[in-house]
Image (cartoon, helix red, strand yellow):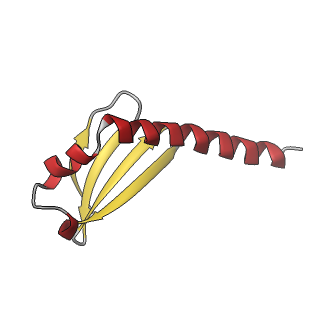
Amino acid sequence: MRVIAELPHPECKITLFNMNQKYIIKFEQGGLEQSYKLSELDLTGGGANEIFQILDEAFIATVVARFKEMRSDFSAAYNRQQY
């Protein structure tokens, strides 16, 4: 897996990888991560720039909201095991 680019964002780390004719977009926030895969064939040839156009602020806002849900879900599961 090869790192293609990183997109700076104040709320999460965004890294674009390339592996086996796929792009992998990884979002990281603390100990949590989300990843999305795109086939190179699904793009028109714009590479990283085309992918970063897909990652608009509306999409990134949903990713950040999902991180909050993930953290809450994990915290609830962890707390159930403590009693």
Q: Residue at x 30, y 47 (%)?
A: 15
Residue 32 appears left or right of 60: right
Q: Position of residue 11 (x, y in %)?
A: 41, 30
Residue 4 appears left or right of 77: left
Q: Where is 3 relative to 29, above or below?
A: below
Q: Which residue is farthest top?
A: 10
In this view, the residue in front, 25 or 30, is 25
Q: Position of residue 57 (x, y in %)?
A: 33, 34
Q: Position of residue 24 (x, y in %)?
A: 31, 58
Q: Which residue is farthest right?
A: 83
Q: Residue at x 36, y 37 (%)?
A: 58
In this view, the residue in front, 25 or 62, is 62
Q: Where is 25 relative to 38, above or below?
A: above
Q: Which residue is farthest left?
A: 45
**Within the image, what quadrant is residue 23 found in?**
bottom left
Q: Position of residue 34 (x, y in %)?
A: 45, 51
Q: Which quarter of the rendered picture does the C terminus lie within?
A: top right
